[in-house]
Image: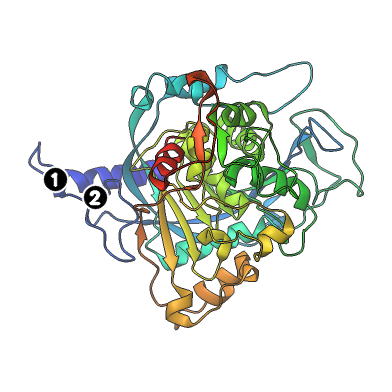
Amino acid sequence: MLQLFCFVVSCFLLVVYSPVGARPPPFQHQRAQQPFGAVSPAGAPSLPFSLSLKTVYHHATSQSAHPGLFRRKDIHPALAPEVHTLDATLASFRRPSALAKQRLFESAPFSVASYEARRIRWEPLAVYGHDLWMESAFDLVPDIGNHDTVLALAIMMNNAYSDVDNTTDWYDLGTPWQLNTSFGWESDGIRGHVFANHDDSLLVISFKGTSAGVWTGGPTGEKDKLNDNMLFSCCCARISRAWTPVCDCYQGNTYYCESHCLEKSIKNTELYYDNAMAIYLDVAEKYPNSTIWLVGHSLGGALASLVGQTYGVPTVAFESPSDRLASRRLHLPRMDDLPLWHFGHTADPIFMGICNGPASICWYGGFAMESTCHAGKVCIWDTVNDKGWRVDSRSHRIKDVIDNILNKTDEFPLLPECLKQEHCSDCAQWTYYDERDGPMPTGEPTTTATMSSSSASL
């Protein structure tokens, strides 16, 4: 089906853009019509796809009771009756080349003796500049101007929170374990639900996010907290003396933070990012000729975004914490035309980057959600000003987006406009320095301009 679609679109382009040498008109954003800033042929046809659950992955962390656990469960079609219909369109964008992917994979430490997720890191390649490793791609992307497509992706994401039989019919991809029903399916590691169309030409991986949210702790609360605080805090989750930091890169009680220390902490720490990457790499290896998209909610949305930025994979995230700070600390490529969208609404303090400070539920729950800026584009429903919603962390649930926004087309007839965040900076109160450039500075940071400049360099 995908090959036939590509042929039809190729013929369409030949007619529309004749004579040879003519170029498509520059992209102009249109509300709820164009998918993103990459070049998408004007009037290019969309093709509907029907997808159902195909596979479920489970990857435990090395700190869990079952380190090295990585397994896959294939779902029989008769047991996956729910079908999700969405639209796709072809677009051109840049992504890492085959050589870059090979170098990333080969440079990641891996032990045959005892399984551990490869820690894919862009830092060794980034020293040569990202442009050296990029290539042009022409592939299917979600038609995020289509309401039913966005709704279908949100429902797929919601299904990643559902339970699956934990004890039978699993294939061990890492260390084999004999598990029983007491094993922490809810409390150990990352889950990925893979949806596919009838011929596996299109696959959607849905990553599970922070379960039960920050207001109740949830079964994966402590492990989610470690990952959230490593990726989305300004410096090791060093908020006050009452907090337990996740690294020691800060200087006393000042707002000085050593950037090289932060990068080493992220490089040497097994993150959910690495577990999510292992799931993506296994799917990509199993289906090398398929188009893959990523979706996720909350922490799962941030993981989907970071994996998508690593390999140039089209990604749709729902109510994700701001991820640009984490992507820069991971040295991920900054691809302006990457098909990456963040959907959320203004009543969600986690998505908006305002769930911080002593009065916030994030502070109370021990989550240092200090980042503000998203990579890619943000698509925001202004539910506070337009609909009178109150800012409330309980509205962070994906079910709120599905039930109270996407399923209420009379109140929300249009999808939000998707735009890059301009003039956005993270952690402006912090000054970051590199120990390799000289000794640690003394005294308090002086000006906002200095702090912003330093933080922007990360």
Q: Nearer the viewer, residue 76 or 188?
A: 188
Quadrant in the picture for residue 96: top left
Residue name at image x 65 percent, y 70 percent: 394
Residue labelled with disc 2: 41
Identity of the residue furthest to the front in this view: 443
Mark 1 Cα-neighbour bin, 10 Å: few <14, some 14–19, many ≥20 = some
Q: Which of 207 and 164 is in front in this view?
A: 207
Quadrant in the picture for residue 115: top right
- Residue 95 percent across, percent down from the top left: 39, 34
Q: Are marks 1 and 2 in contact (CB under 8 Å)?
A: yes
Instruction: Kindly report the distance in space between the C-alpha atoms of the residues bearing marks 1 and 2.
Output: 9 Å
Q: Can residue 83 be seen in this view?
A: no
Residue name at image x 70 percent, y 57 percent: 161
Residue name at image x 40 percent, y 77 percent: 413
Q: What element carries label 2?
A: loop
The count of marks equals 2
Colour scheme employed for the rendering of this structure: rainbow
Question: Is 89 placed left or right of 313 in the picture?
Answer: left
Residue type for callout 2: Pro
Residue labelled with disc 1: 17
Question: Is 220 placed left or right of 16 in the picture?
Answer: right
- Residue 86 percent across, percent down from the top left: 46, 59
Q: In this view, does 364 lie above or below 434?
A: below
- Disc with the residue nearer the chain's start (1 vs 2): 1
Residue name at image x 81 percent, y 32 percent: 67
